[in-house]
Image (tube, rainbow, N blue to C red):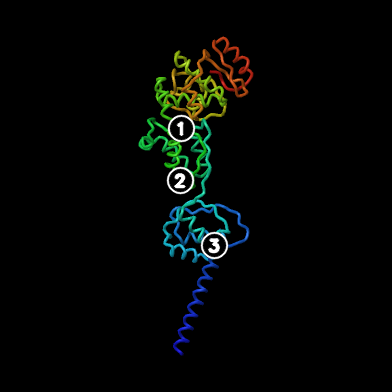
Amino acid sequence: MILFRRSALGLLLGVLISLMAMSGFWWLNQPIGGPIPAYLVDIPPGTPLTEVSHILHLNHLIGPEWFFTLLGRVQRVDRKIIPGEYELHAGMRPTELLKKLVKGEVYQHALTIPEGYNIVQIADILAQKNLAHKQDILRLNRDPAFIRSLHVQAPTLEGYLFPDTYQFSRYTPPESIIRTFVNRFHDVVTPDLKDRGTIMGMSLQEVLTLASVIEKETGLAAERPLVSGVFHNRLQRGIPLQSDPTVIYALASFDGNIRKADLSVNSPYNTYKIRGLPPGPIANPGLAAIHAALYPTQTNFVYFVARNDGSHQFSVTLEEHNKAVNQFQRQSNGKRAS
């Protein structure tokens, strides 16, 4: 009888302890509570579980640090936490937090590359967003082995970084960022477009070079094929393109004004001095500009000049062109004529 009572008491005590442990776990696993605005929490690469617990505690996302550390070790995920920025809030349970960190559900930053941006401008955007160091991007842009790995046959990646909106996490390697840009280019520039270039007697590099000049010359969609027609006419007749954007690309610095001295710069990109296309793209064109380079408007126009309202006046003869220049450009410091 005494033995039975002791057994029953021991069983009861075990149940109570189990209930207390379960209650304690339930209590420790409750969210902190209060207002639950979401904000970004950074978990740098190489951060141990104990430090992750400390970061979460400092951000008022968990209670005792030891519990979160124990939770990670019990689940054997203490070495499986993915570094990055996480959008978290105090309404999340520790188990939810841990699951999110192990799954690597990192915050994605939206990054838009505008049409017509060159490699330096793209590197600046990435640096401003704190997604990559500018020098890393510029170095990879000229790395022959890296360029070959992207199936690009060119000395640099200028022209192959396709303008679009992308999503990147904070610790995405710069190689992966650039690879994403170039992969998008390969997706958009289809074999049909490449074949069209071959039919026209142009390499892909030449198509992108012309497209980049078209992209920089006009922002009007309706004008792109017409500008392309003018440049194709000039190329066929051996007339220099005389494009300001190519000159600007060759300058070490540019304050917004083209000067007479700039037109005398010795550079393969100075299309006032050379005939034909410059040696490579001067920017990264969008699909519309690429399409315009491949499908120019059939026209007799050989000249165009900015009207200072975003559009251009096109001319067939030099006499017509000079009149347009007098009308639209002599009174201003705007864009030069081509």
Report crowding for label 1: few under 14, some 14 to 19, many 20 or more residues within 10 A (C-alpha).
few
Report crowding for label 3: few under 14, some 14 to 19, many 20 or more residues within 10 A (C-alpha).
many
Q: Secondary structure at mark 2?
A: loop
Q: Pointer 1: what residue?
A: 188
Q: Secondary structure at mark 1?
A: helix
Which residue type does callout 1 highlight?
Val
Q: Are marks 1 and 3 in contact (CB under 8 Å)?
A: no
Instruction: Residue at 47%, 14% (x, y): give it.
Output: 239
| Alpha carbons under labels 2 and 1: distance apart | 23 Å
Which residue type does callout 3 highlight?
Ile
Instruction: Residue at 49%, 29% (x, y): give it.
Output: 287
193, 211: nearer the viewer:
193
Q: Pointer 3: what residue?
A: 62
Nearest to N terminus: mark 2 or mark 1 = 2
| Alpha carbons under labels 1 and 3: distance apart | 46 Å
Which residue type does callout 2 highlight?
Thr
Q: Are marks 3 and 2 in contact (CB under 8 Å)?
A: no
Residue 91 location, x and y as percent?
Answer: 58, 59
